[in-house]
Image: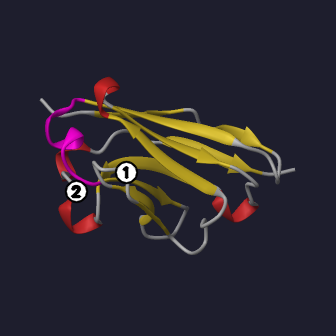
Amino acid sequence: QVHLVESGGGLVQPGGSLRLSCAHSGGVFSIYVMGWYRQAPGKQRELVAGITKGGTTNYADSVKGRFTISRDDAKNSVYLQMDNLKPEDTAVYYCNLAPITTVLDHAWGQGTQVTVSS
């Protein structure tokens, strides 16, 4: 049974940092490209960062230079270090396969809320 569990969100002031964690059930999540997505109220879910099994990363322009994605397949985990957070980063953050055309729809977790506000 596949599962994804996100954690680490919270309320942070602009300029602050958070580290998100995604615990997964292994299998395909340990083999293929993993990504972090976010969805703000009234907006579509968007991919913000992806990482291959070999460690190659890519980022949306809006987070490039501020977010860092990493993975530890031995621990069935994917992480997102978020620095210099901005109010526009406020969203619910999710992990899944990437790109969005490859996600396992039945595996979406509950997400973790990130709120950036003073």
The quadrant where residue 33 appears: bottom left
Where residue 82 appears, as percent x and y from the top left, is: 64, 49
**Which label's residue is closer to the chain start, 2 or 1?**
1
Q: Position of residue 35 (x, y in %)?
A: 37, 54
Which residue is label 1 attached to?
A: 55
Give the side of residue 55 with respect to residue 25, left or right.
right
Label 1 element class: loop
**Amino acid at circle 2:** Val
| Helix, strand or loop at mark 2 | loop
Q: Amino acid at mark 1?
A: Gly
The residue sitting at 39% across, 58% down in the picture is 50
Q: Residue furthest top?
A: 75
**Residue 26 lies in the magenta stretch:** yes
Magenta stretch bounds: 25-33
Q: Residues within 10 Å of mark 2 (few under 14, many from 20)?
A: some
Residue for badge 2: 103
